[in-house]
Each structure stands twice: as C-alpha cells, then as structure tokens.
Amino acid sequence: MNYKDFLKALDKKLAEYFERDSEHIYCQIGCSACCEKGDYPLSQLELEYLMQGFIALDNPTKQRVQENVKNIQKGGVCPFLIDKKCSVYPYRPIICRVHGLAYLCNNMTVKVPYCVNVGKNYHKVYENGEIVINPISENLDTKILLKGCNYGEIRNLADWLK
Ligand code: SF4
C-alpha cells in the first residue's frame, strides 16, 4: 500500500474513533492547542510528504512558515501553524491526525491528549491522572501504525528542520 492510501485508510479509522468518543471530544475549528505545544515526532517518510505540502503553499505562506522555522523552539508552536490553522493539513504527520484521542499503549498505560489539562478532550472523565472510561484499545503510536512500512528514522520536527 502506498503512503497516500495508508493515510486514507488511517483517516477513516480515526474518524470512527473520534465518532466513538465524540461526547468527550471538544476539537473545533479555531482551536489549535495541539499545534502550540509539542515535539511533533515524525518519520522520514512523513517528513517527505509534509515537505510536498510545504512546496504546494503560495509564496507568502511559505515565507511565514520559513520565518517560523527560524524561531522554532523545542516543545513550542509548530511552524506550519498559520493564523491558527494548519497550512499543510492534508499532508500533516500521523501524530497530528491521532492527537485528541485517548488510547491504550503496549505497556497498558493510556495516552491522553495534552488538552485534557486545559478543560478540553476527556476532561470530564479524567480523574487523578487517568480516564475513567474504556480507552480506544488500539495503540495509535506512529511507530506501531507504520509497522511494516519503510518509514525511516523518527525525530522531533525541530530536529528535522534545524
Ligand atoms: S503540521 Fe499542522 S496539524 Fe501538525 S502540529 Fe503542525 S500545524 Fe498542527
């Protein structure tokens, strides 16, 4: 399966998970909390696709992204976030697609989205550092989802772009 087909299938599956947990999801247009704080780890394969998105941008937007890249900070705002929107949305990495969901990892811990702490996703079912509903039982970590693909190295976005 090529990467575009893989993403199509992944998006379909993730849409079902977002639907399953919709009563706990507060994602909406204009909220970019998950793009404002993070390391955004992604593989070489995802980076190459992301760069196709960058190349397709108009020149003024490209320049704004390039300015952001100069000021990129570890754990900070993603340089592709322009006017609170993802400028490369169809090309975004897997971590961006999965963000917002709570899911079970291999070591039986539940990964919850960062925004649970700012009164958003799952906050009503989050007690003492844990969610009290059954989480999605599939591990949605990039490495696991890309298993079997030749995805190359995984690095944080700031490390790829420096
Ligand atoms: S690539 Fe897009 S969706 Fe991902 S963190 Fe950056 S702005 Fe957000």
Image (cartoon, rainbow, N blue to C red):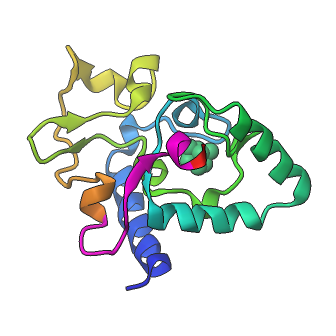
47 or 141: which is nearer to us? 47
Residue at far bottom of view: 1
Position of residue 98 measured from the top left corner of the image (x, y, whole percent): 40, 50
Instruction: Residue at 77%, 45% (x, y): give it.
Output: 66
Left or right? Give the position of 19 relative to 135.
right
Q: Is residue 5 above or below residue 121?
A: below
Left or right? Give the position of 8 relative to 68.
left
In the figure, residue 124 lies in which quadrant? top left
Check the picture and name the quadrant holding the N terminus. bottom left
Position of residue 44 measured from the top left corner of the image (x, y, whole percent): 46, 62
Magenta-highlighted residues: 146-160
Q: Is residue 76 above or below residue 51?
A: above
Left or right? Give the position of 46 relative to 116.
right
Check the picture and name the quadrant holding the C terminus. top right
Position of residue 4 measured from the top left corner of the image (x, y, whole percent): 50, 77
Q: Is residue 112 visible?
A: yes
**Residue 10 in magenta?**
no
Instruction: Residue at 59%, 40% (x, y): give it.
Output: 28
Position of residue 134 measured from the top left corner of the image (x, y, whole percent): 16, 40
117 or 53: which is nearer to us? 53
In the figure, residue 116 lies in which quadrant? top left
